Amino acid sequence: MDTKTTIIRFSNGDVKKIKPDQRVIYYHANAQTTCTTYPDGLEVVQFPNKQTEKFYPDGSKEIVFPDGTVKHLKDGQEETLFPDGTIVRVERNGDKTIVLSNGQKEIHTAQFKRREYPDGTIKTVYCSGCQETKYISGRVKIKDEAGNIILDEKQMSPQHAASHGKCQLQFFAKTDKN
């Protein structure tokens, strides 16, 4: 069993090491970057600014930035974890979910942007510019695209709630024409 490391030095300053466990460590002198390839196919690239990128055999990728931010990319989806606890997820269709460290959550789609607060309040801004705020008390406030209040209901009756759903559909229909 060979326990020696094979070292190849290139004239441009690059160095290739083949370890006994079959890891290949390649140092790119010009870029000051080290690329380590493992027998299972994992490839780890380390940059001089302390950024590290991992390329997995299944096609997924992980990037660790110098500030501690970690980004995962897999199957067209992306998840980023920030040092303050914020998490950002982007789906293949472009929908984005942001979970903030203060407990608030944002959802961004092609149709609307919504923020959900820890107290249960939900504020939605539609593409048309219309805004809807739902409070935990049952109160609903709707503003048109100019910011004028067009509905401020303390408690919705079931009949009004049904027509309110139609109002949302009108907001979407309005934006489909744009």
Image: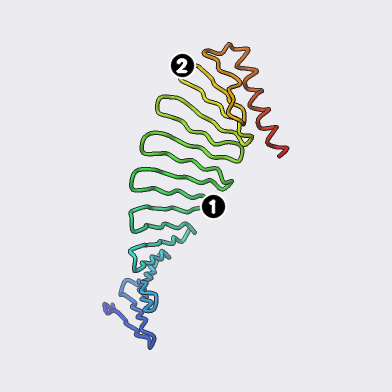
* Circle 1: element type: loop
Q: Earlier in the sequence, mark 2 or mark 1?
A: 1
Q: Residue at x 40, y 39 (%)?
A: 100
Q: Which residue is outermost to the left?
A: 3
- Position in image of residue 103 (x %, y %): 38, 33
Residue 118 screen position, x and y as percent: 40, 28
Instruction: Report the front residue among 156 and 51.
Output: 156
| Left or right: 116 as drawn, with respect to 109 | left
Q: CA distance from mark 2 to mark 1?
A: 39 Å
Q: Which mark is residue 137?
A: 2
Question: Marks 2 and 1: which is nearer the front?
Answer: 2
Asked whether, in this view, residue 75 is left or right of residue 101, the answer is right
What residue does disc 1 label?
76
* Colour scheme employed for the rendering of this structure: rainbow
> Along the horizontal axis of the image, is 127 left or right of 43?
right
On the rendered image, what quadrant is the C terminus found in? Answer: top right
Q: Residue furthest right?
A: 177
